[in-house]
Image: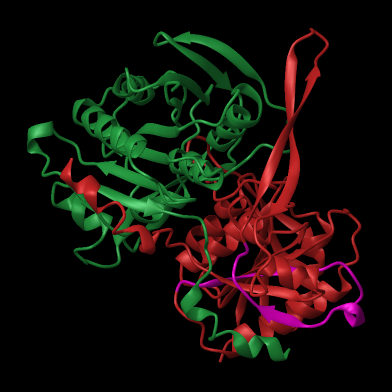
Chain colours: A red, B green
Amino acid sequence: MSKPLILITNDDGITAKGIKSLTKAMEGLGELIIVAPDSPQSGKGHAITISDPLRIREENVYGVKAYSCSGTPVDCVKIAIYHLLKRKPDLLVSGINHGSNASTNVIYSGTMSAAVEGAIENIPSVGFSLLDYDADADFDASIHYAREISKQLLAMKNPDHVCLNVNIPKGKLNDLKGLKVCRQGKASWEDTFDVRKDQFGRDYFWLTGEFKDQEQAEDTDMYALANGYVSVVPTQFDLTAYDELKTYKEIEKI
Amino acid sequence: MSKPLILITNDDGITAKGIKSLTKAMEGLGELIIVAPDSPQSGKGHAITISDPLRIREENVYGVKAYSCSGTPVDCVKIAIYHLLKRKPDLLVSGINHGSNASTNVIYSGTMSAAVEGAIENIPSVGFSLLDYDADADFDASIHYAREISKQLLAMKNPDHVCLNVNIPKGKLNDLKGLKVCRQGKASWEDTFDVRKDQFGRDYFWLTGEFKDQEQAEDTDMYALANGYVSVVPTQFDLTAYDELKTYKEIEKI
């Protein structure tokens, strides 16, 4: 049997400490290949590049076969699967992101969108995020969990078209309380635009804001993280609001 | 009572025929304001701009208060709600997109991501897409349905945090069979990368591909559209794979 093929990507770019840590976490688990953005792509969600061409470049990083790509995280997954790789990966790992992708952040996140693209392709996929935005964050506990979860995914029968959203609290391995499988909590950004003047006196705007819980339920990722657990949310991409199919039935009369 | 405030956006950019058509469809339904990208933003998904500042410019188009924004469709919604508008819109309409956003396309779509952002903000929101990529497409039937659906949404009690994904087949109003409320069909892109050489002999890559059904079920948007109906999918943003919470329970033992 050939070794499992593991595709590694992220959204912070191929030189980020997070992807270096993730590559370390995968050591010995299979044949590794990195295809990651050549520049930071945070907040790129599920964006793909359709009006511009893409470039890829072979990179010599981390002692692993690696390519940087001029596109988004989802572009990286697409060009890996449909152009660079000879066979479908057995596992796709994305991250380790510098910062939380819990709750509603999943849909803004390039890290998680890469994992969701893996799920669309029916590849067992997982996005890892550490709740620390620092470029030099301590990834030791994250490396442990990324490795153990990946081993488990390689060993188990994965459900079709589902990936995992794993978020890891800041802290040493011993400080963390373990893993909790949970649902995506309800929370959202209360945005603020910081208005500044450029050298010509014209306004420009920086998006900033505060992420706010809208519930305090114990089965959510927000709750798990606030209580020292690593959160694991099984994640899919059918956005149908099934409970509301009936509500809108009257629209059919138009 | 003051007139309903209707926020109009899209992903094809403020000069696209689709947003002009949507503005026409909203005539007389309320106070209209357009906040739309200053350039085409197709395939931008739920991307937001966090590492660059945004610019906005007042525009004199379509006889309606209008701003173009240098960011993505989701940026447009955010800057409208948190900076430009004095009160929360009563309705957010996005489109009319040039091309389908049915099935899995919902997550790649800037048009629908704007509507989803509206749903996050708990604003009744809807994305309209016409199954015709032509810049000069015939939007007459789409205008009819966009207007009638918007009237209905303004009149009804909308469920919290849900928006609509409306796709309209090509054709004259009389050729269409009406509306079907349905679920998001299972389908995905089989991508191809067109490899070309630049003037220096280096490869560059264009993303292309074919969208393929993975099921033929009658309750899907793909089926409705293939059979001449306008598809209406109630859409939400909780990506939790609820059916698989148990499957992954063993991961908690790590």
Check the image and name the residue furthest to the front: B1
- Please give left or right for residue B229 compared with residue B22 in the image: left
Query: Residue B172: x, y in percent?
Result: 12, 31
In front: B167, or A160? B167
Taking the spot 46% from the left edge, 72% from the top edge, the residue there is A161
Location of the C terminus of chain A (image quadrant): top left
Query: Residue B100: x, y in percent?
Result: 32, 43
Location of the N terminus of chain A (image quadrant): bottom right
Residue A178 visible, this orientation: yes
Quarter of the image holding residue B96? top left
Q: Which residues are magenta?
A: A161-185
Q: Is residue A23 magenta?
A: no
Q: Is residue A182 above or below residue A9?
A: below
Taking the spot 79% from the left edge, 7% from the top edge, the residue there is A200
In front: B225, or A17? B225
Taking the spot 63% from the left edge, 90% from the top edge, the residue there is B250
Taking the spot 66% from the left edge, 74% from the top edge, the residue there is A232
Q: Is residue A69 above or below residue B152?
A: below
- Please give left or right for residue B80 compared with residue A190 in the image: left
